[in-house]
Amino acid sequence: MAETKSTATVKPSTSVQAKKSGNSISWIAPLVCILAGYFIWRIVLGSASNFARPGAGWFWPEHEGPKGKIYNMYLGGIIVPLLIGLFLTVVTFIIERFMTISKATGTGSNADFIRKVQYHLANKNVDAAVAECDKQKGSVGNVMKAGLHRYKDMISNTELTTDQKVMAIQKEVEEATSLELPMLEKNLVFLSTIASVATLLGLLGTVLGMIRSFSALGEGDGGGAAAGKLSQGISEALYNTALGIGTSAFSIIFYNIFTTRIDGITYGIDESGFTLTQSFASLYK
């Protein structure tokens, strides 16, 4: 009775392991930054020594007569510490995303890296191509390395057809990509959200400041002193608008910078998968 060969199967798991990193910064950072914003507003800007006529109370004392222009920001109201906290949150996530995306970019040009891998694959030197991945690192290098391991397995596989082998390599690349892309896009939602919320909060603070200013005007006698107080109140209220627009602009600029860099990495990943499948299909028919 003839022996039956066992059918070769494609390994279901990817060679790239999921990154076990928490995202505690997503809720800790905003809370800490808002508390820091209140500290800056209340303790630094709102110190009694910065005003000619300090008010009573602890949470929100109504000081008057700021000794410097920067201390007018304190008089902008309770929305100011929220806006300062949002700005600090934006800075925190900019630093965090910059570090993550810089690491994901790799140690060199992705285009040069892919050309080197193509050269080694054309010479059927898979080990040299894997060594290039170890040098490059980053998301493109990780995905390419996962695909190369499956590429090497498929070379020695005699049970599957060429099309099945190419599909196995493509599936490996897709699985590795699904592990890399979420790490690149994580926390960008904070930048896009703050870009909208900061402007609205700034307008809210301005409206509240205008309400206080006109209320003070209505309680006065309508003379020059009241008009001066109204002008000062409007100036203080506009600090909210300035902080809101500035924070929003800062967030939008870096959000676009990061998405552009992520698009470049994604293009490199797509090119990696295309390189592996096309190389295998042409060399191992």
Image (tube, rainbow, N blue to C red):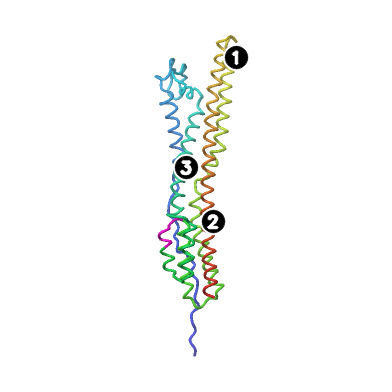
Give the x, y percent position of residue 272.
51, 61
Magenta stretch, overall SS: helix
Q: What's under tag 2, amino acid-wise?
A: Tyr
Q: Image check: 51 left or right of 262? A: left
Task: Measure the C-alpha gap from mark 1 to mark 3.
Answer: 45 Å
Q: Residue under circle 2?
A: 267
Nearer-N-terminus badge (2/1): 1
Closest to the camera, between mark 2 and mark 1, is: 2
Q: Secondary structure at mark 1?
A: helix
Nearer-N-terminus badge (2/3): 3
Q: Image check: 248 left or right of 141? A: right
Task: Measure the C-alpha gap from mark 2 to mark 3.
Answer: 22 Å
Give the x, y percent position of residue 122.
49, 69
Give the x, y percent position of residue 11.
48, 69
Q: Residue under circle 1?
A: 218
Q: Residue under circle 3?
A: 94
Q: Are marks 1 and 3 in contact (CB under 8 Å)?
A: no
Give the x, y percent position of residue 212.
56, 20
Displayed quadrant of residue 278: bottom right
Q: Which of these two is toward me, 11 or 104?
A: 104
